[in-house]
Image (cartoon, rainbow, N blue to C red):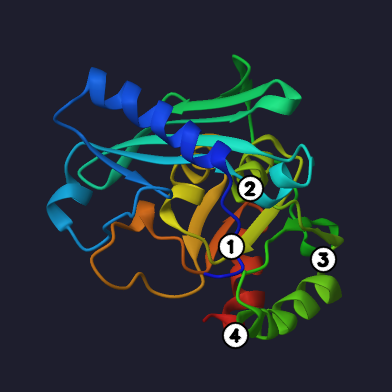
Amino acid sequence: DGNELLTSADLQADELIRGEIEKAFPEHSILSEESSPDLSDPEALNGPLWIVDPIDGTVNYAYNMHQVAVSIAYAEGGRVQAGVVCCPFFDETFTALRGKGARLNGQPIRASECGQLARALIGTGFPYAADARVALLERLRLVLGHCRDIRRVGSAASDLCWVAMGRLDGFCEAIKPWDMAAAAFIAREAGARVGHLGPVEGDLPEELYGKDLVVAAPGIYEALVALLAPTAS
């Protein structure tokens, strides 16, 4: 997309992370935002796979805003097994292993106990394409009319980890696998519910499918999906 920013730091971080993975696991596949990802190869997507976003929040980084994250997930058979999201400017590292819960800097975290949409703080993001933003207006109207408030941080991985630890009560946005694979997994391991406003389409495994993603505290998940379902793209 012509409006999407790419910095030299993205490429350098991607090269560093890919190099370390390839050195340790030469037989594994890597799906990275910066490396012309092929989402049409079912064999690669279902085998040992690393999903990498070297800088999630590139625009924030370019403008010297600190809401930036490095996101790495490991998946087997289309299911994420481990995830790490590092927010370097805040010295926060979120981690999770399947069935072992989620942690922030080594300490266990849990999603919020919010049980009412009227009390829920919801995160979202905006697409780069201007014409796609128009369709988002109805979703924003619904959230602002039924929830406590809305936040737009500029880093989906950060948003999802904030749901995992209760800084946000929910999140909805259409994002890419590298934006959400690690962080949505961390949120799920922290007790949040993860799903979509519509059916999972195509060959992409559900845990790598980011279209109309919804991640929320269990007490508001169903109500949030019901509220926003009419806005599914």
Question: Label 1: how many residues lie within 10 Å, few (<14), some (14-19) or many (20+)?
Answer: few
Q: Which amino acid does label 1 sit on?
A: Glu
- Counting from the top left corner in percent of width and height, residue 128 is at 62, 69
Q: Quote the CA–CA distance across marks 1 and 2.
A: 9 Å
Quick one: label 2 or label 3, which is nearer the N terminus? 2
Q: Quote the CA–CA distance across marks 4 and 2.
A: 30 Å
Which residue is tagged 2?
A: 58
- Quick check: 107 left or right of 18? right
- Quick check: 109 left or right of 150? left
Q: Quote the CA–CA distance across marks 4 and 3.
A: 16 Å
In the picture, the disc for residue 4 is 1
Quick one: label 1 or label 4, which is nearer the N terminus? 1
Q: Please report the residue visible at 13 percent of the width from the left and 30 percent of the height from the top.
A: 27
Quick one: label 4 or label 3, which is nearer the N terminus? 3
Reply above or below: 181 against 70.
below
Quick one: label 4 or label 2, which is nearer the N terminus? 2
Q: What element carries label 1?
A: loop
- Which one is in front in this view, the residue at disc 4 or the one at disc 2? 2
In the picture, the disc for residue 147 is 3
Reply above or below: 178 against 39.
above
Question: Label 2: how many residues lie within 10 Å, few (<14), some (14-19) or many (20+)?
Answer: many
Q: Do the residues labelled 1 and 4 touch (CB within 8 Å)?
A: no
Which residue is tagged 4?
A: 230
Does residue 153 show up? yes
Q: What element carries label 3?
A: loop
Q: Which amino acid does label 2 sit on?
A: Thr
